[in-house]
Image (cartoon, rainbow, N blue to C red):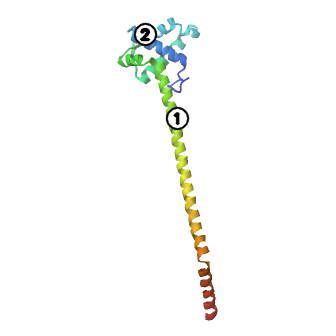
Amino acid sequence: MYAIKTIEMEITDKDIEKIDFILNRLVEHDVNVIANDLYKEGYYDEYNNDTELIEKDFKFLQSVYQNIGIGKIVDTKDSECIFSDSRAILLHKNGGFKKYFENLKANQSKDNERQLLKDKIDKLKLEELEYKETIRSLEEELKISSLIKNYWWLILSAIGIGISIGKFLI
């Protein structure tokens, strides 16, 4: 299954086979394609002549073509057909729908990986900020303790003088 979703369902490998069959018929034979063409090729054997299921599936395949912007959907007096256009020919030359969906899946995988890396970078930046804040705090504490260590005699002298002046004034 591919992560590509349309309005109703996900696209399966079997759907891609059908879509590629339609594309091949459109480009190689230069004919329009209807649901009956897929039925004749055996793609709808599992539906046991249930025309409602066949039509529903063919409408889904048409929606895939419409969503991607390939081919033209045209109403005829009997049913809707898919016709070829220049984008269908180009897609056919580039490997068809199977290749298209493989590339799409690879791009989604790369996008997911890229997003994971961005999230990891954001997390590392946050940790870096917290680390720098901790370092600054420790540096300040170190400066204070260093001052006390280096000037303890001055601090004690100031306290002694203050106590002497306080006793003298009282």
Distance from disc 2 to disc 1, alpha carbons, whole Å, reads 35 Å
Q: Which residue is mark 2?
A: 25
Q: Secondary structure at mark 1?
A: helix
> Disc 2 or 1, which lies upstream in sequence?
2
Vertical order, 2 against 80 (above or below): below
- Quarter of the figure with residue 137: bottom right
| Residue sticking out furthest to the left | 86
Q: Position of residue 33 (x, y in %)?
A: 43, 10
Q: Is residue 137 above or below residue 86?
A: below
Residue extending furthest toward the top: 40
Q: Which residue corresponds to the image point at 52% horizontal and 12% vertical from the top-left?
A: 54
Note whether residue 45 is visible. yes
Camera sees residue 32: no
The kind of residue tagged 1 is: Asn
Q: Position of residue 169 (x, y in %)?
A: 61, 94
Q: Relative to 30, is 161 above or below?
A: below
Q: Quadrant of the N terminus?
A: top right
Q: Quadrant of the C terminus?
A: bottom right
Foreground mark, 2 or 1, reads: 1
Looking at the rendered structure, the kind of residue marked 2 is: Arg
In the image, what residue occupies the spot 61% across and 78% down? 152
Which residue is at the front of the view, 72 or 167? 167
Please state the total of marks drawn on the protein image: 2
* Residue at disc 2, secondary structure: helix
Which disc is residue 112 wearing? Answer: 1
- Local crowd size for mark 1, using a 10 Å CA cut-off: few (<14), some (14–19), many (≥20): few
Relative to the observer, which residue lies in front, 162 or 10? Answer: 162
Q: Residue 66 in the image: state x and y as whole percent.
A: 42, 21
Number of residues whose C-alpha sits closer than 10 Å to that of mark 2, classed few (under 14), some (14–19) or many (20 or more): some
- Residue depicted at x 50% and y 28%: 106
Which residue: 45% across, 10% down?
34
